[in-house]
């Protein structure tokens, strides 16, 4: 698997991000990127000295709009859920929990992109330019 590290250079929203790689770097629509916290999970030697970091996954993003030198990435798309009770909800209504279940437990959730765990104070929508951004998160190309 061809793996390259790029940087998140702009946070558009909690579902859209820009990286510093595009067509010129071999990025195509549909490519997946693993955003990493590179200072997580320290690896220590026998003397308890940090010799490196394994890193931790923050999010998986997909390229949706690729330009020559940068790309827009989005979080995964979550399909809508119907107005049906889940099997767990049905089981609760027909069990000893029934007296505690009040009203309908049905929920409607429209289709949407998964919201990434971000610091809202670092979000900079494209329409605005006054919000601060944090640059430097690694985005590793997975596909």
Image: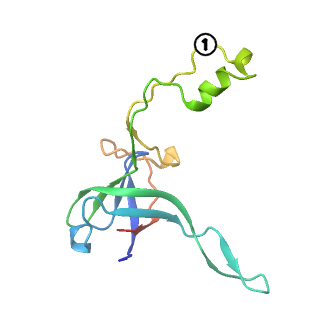
Q: Position of residue 28 (x, y in %)?
A: 24, 64
Q: Quadrant of the N terminus?
A: bottom left
Q: Where is residue 109 in the image (x, y as percent from the top left)?
A: 44, 29
Q: In which quarter of the image is the C terminus?
A: bottom left
Total numbered labels: 1
Tell me which residue sits at (57%, 31%) in the image. 87
**Within 10 Å of the Cα at label 1, are there few (<14), some (14-19), or many (20+) other Cα atoms?**
few
97 horizontally vs 103: left or right: right
Q: Which of 91 and 99 is in front in this view?
A: 91
Q: Nearer the viewer, residue 128 or 97?
A: 97
Q: Where is residue 11 in the image (x, y as percent from the top left)?
A: 40, 52
When the figure is inspected, residue 19 is found, relative to residue 128, above or below; the finding is below
96 horizontally vs 136: left or right: right
Colour scheme of the rendered structure: rainbow
Q: Nearer the viewer, residue 142 or 131?
A: 142
Q: Where is residue 81 in the image (x, y as percent from the top left)?
A: 43, 31
Q: Give the structural element (helix, strand or loop) at label 1.
A: loop
Where residue 13 sits, quadrant-wise, is top left
Tell me which residue sits at (44%, 44%) in the image. 114
94 horizontally vs 128: left or right: right
Residue at which label 1 appears: 103
Tell me which residue sits at (33%, 42%) in the image. 128
Where residue 67 sits, quadrant-wise, is bottom left
Quick one: which residue is furthest to the bottom in this view? 46
When the figure is inspected, residue 109 is found, relative to residue 94, above or below; the finding is below
Tell me which residue sits at (27%, 63%) in the image. 70
């Amino acid at each position: 698997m061809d793996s390259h590290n790029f940087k998140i250079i702009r946070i558009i929203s909690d579902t859209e991000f820009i990286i510093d790689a595009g067509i010129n770097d071999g990025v195509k629509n549909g490519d997946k990127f693993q955003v990493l916290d590179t200072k997580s999970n320290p690896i220590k030697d026998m003397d308890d000295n940090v010799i490196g970091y394994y890193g931790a996954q923050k999010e998986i993003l997909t390229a949706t709009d690729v330009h020559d030198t940068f790309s827009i990435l989005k979080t995964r798309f979550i399909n809508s859920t119907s107005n049906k009770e889940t099997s767990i909800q049905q089981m609760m209504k027909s069990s000893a929990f029934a007296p505690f279940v009040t009203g309908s437990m049905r929920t409607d959730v429209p289709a949407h992109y998964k919201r990434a765990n971000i610091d809202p104070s670092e979000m900079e929508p494209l329409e605005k330019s006054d919000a601060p951004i944090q640059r430097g998160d690694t985005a590793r190309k997975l596909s």
